[in-house]
Image (spheres, rainbow, N blue to C red):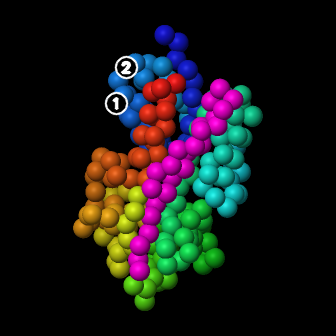
């Protein structure tokens, strides 16, 4: 059977592999129907604009760019950390949270800033959110995954990336950075959103 090409608007190899693994896990009747390609696979090397104030807006912006410029079915994601005591900041600015302190896309500085902001704060509840927007057959579908938890008072663990060392998911006494990738994927915001996308693809 000829596979349908579906571009994931990212060049993050971990994200691509996660989607491929979840498609494989659905069995051959699904994985044999779709071929997931990265931006590099389709020759897209430009910086795709991403300047919306919402996760869904950013995901749509990226998916639309690829859809329009490369004429392919595609999906894009956007994620971030929302901290209740900070009015859901850093949100869409998660990767650039410490930019105002001279650090761009610097996880160490982002974690430092967040711990400082919460130093005297009792309500440390937070959540990670992922939104995926799929543009396929001229239709748009949105999928979301949320993982609730809290910000710890100090870093713990060395796995993962970003805010993982200071995020403890609800019901656990370890941070994301102390979990294996499989353990994290089973409960993470991205894992949930990707499984919702894969469930949709199963039916289409
Ligand atoms: P992205 O949209 O998935 O690239 O995520 C944007 C930013 O949100 C990342 O650079 C991280 O700072 C943060 N982030 C998203 N997901 C995670 C996660 O699973 N662990 C830790 N940080 C994350």
Dot 2, how many residues are within 10 Å of its Cα: few (below 14), some (14-19), or many (20+)?
Answer: few
Assign a secondary structure to mark 1. helix
Residue at 70% across / 57% down in the picture? 51
Q: Is residue 109 magenta?
A: no
Which label was assigned to residue 25? Answer: 1
Residue reaching furthest to the front = 203
Which label was assigned to residue 63? Answer: none
**Residue 7 percent across, percent down from the top left:** 58, 32
For label 2, being within 8 Å of ligand 1 is answered no
Dot 1, how many residues are within 10 Å of its Cα: few (below 14), some (14-19), or many (20+)?
Answer: few
**Which of the two residues, 61 or 137, is positioned nearer the viewer here?**
137
* Quadrant in the rendering for residue 118: bottom left
Which segment is the magenta one? 123-146
* Quadrant in the rendering for residue 93: bottom right
Say above or below: 80 vs 23: below
Name the chief secondary structure element in magenta: strand
**Residue 28 percent across, percent down from the top left:** 37, 20
* Quadrant in the rendering for residue 87: bottom right
Residue reaching furthest to the right = 69
CA–CA distance between discs 2 and 1?
A: 8 Å
**Residue 149 percent across, percent down from the top left:** 37, 66
**Residue 170 percent across, percent down from the top left:** 32, 64
Residue reaching furthest to the top = 1
Residue at 60% across / 55% down in the picture? 55
Residue at 49% across / 29% down in the picture? 201
Which label was assigned to residue 28? Answer: 2
- Evaluate whether residue 44 shows in this view: no
- Evaluate whether residue 134 shows in this view: yes
**Which of the two residues, 100 or 1, is positioned nearer the viewer here?**
1
Left or right placement of residue 137 versus residue 23 in this view = right
Assign a secondary structure to mark 2. helix
Residue reaching furthest to the bottom = 120
């Amino acid at each position: 059977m000829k596979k349908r090409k579906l571009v994931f608007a990212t060049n993050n190899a971990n994200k691509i592999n996660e989607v491929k693994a979840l498609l494989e896990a659905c069995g051959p009747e699904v994985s044999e129907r779709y071929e997931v390609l990265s931006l590099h696979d389709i020759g897209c090397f430009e910086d795709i604009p991403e300047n919306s104030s919402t996760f869904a807006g950013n995901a749509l912006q990226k998916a639309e760019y690829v859809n329009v410029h490369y004429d392919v079915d595609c999906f894009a994601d956007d994620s971030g950390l929302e901290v209740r005591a900070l009015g859901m900041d850093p949100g869409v600015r998660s990767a650039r949270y410490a930019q105002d302190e001279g650090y761009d896309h610097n996880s160490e500085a982002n974690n430092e800033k967040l711990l400082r902001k919460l130093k005297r704060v009792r309500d440390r509840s937070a959540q990670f959110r992922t939104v995926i927007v799929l543009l396929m057959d001229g239709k748009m579908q949105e999928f979301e995954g949320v993982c609730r938890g809290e910000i710890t008072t100090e870093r713990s663990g060395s796995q993962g990336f970003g805010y993982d060392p200071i995020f403890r998911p609800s019901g656990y006494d370890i941070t994301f950075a102390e979990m294996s990738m499989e353990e994290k994927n089973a409960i993470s915001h991205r894992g949930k959103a990707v499984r919702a996308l894969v469930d949709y693809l199963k039916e289409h």
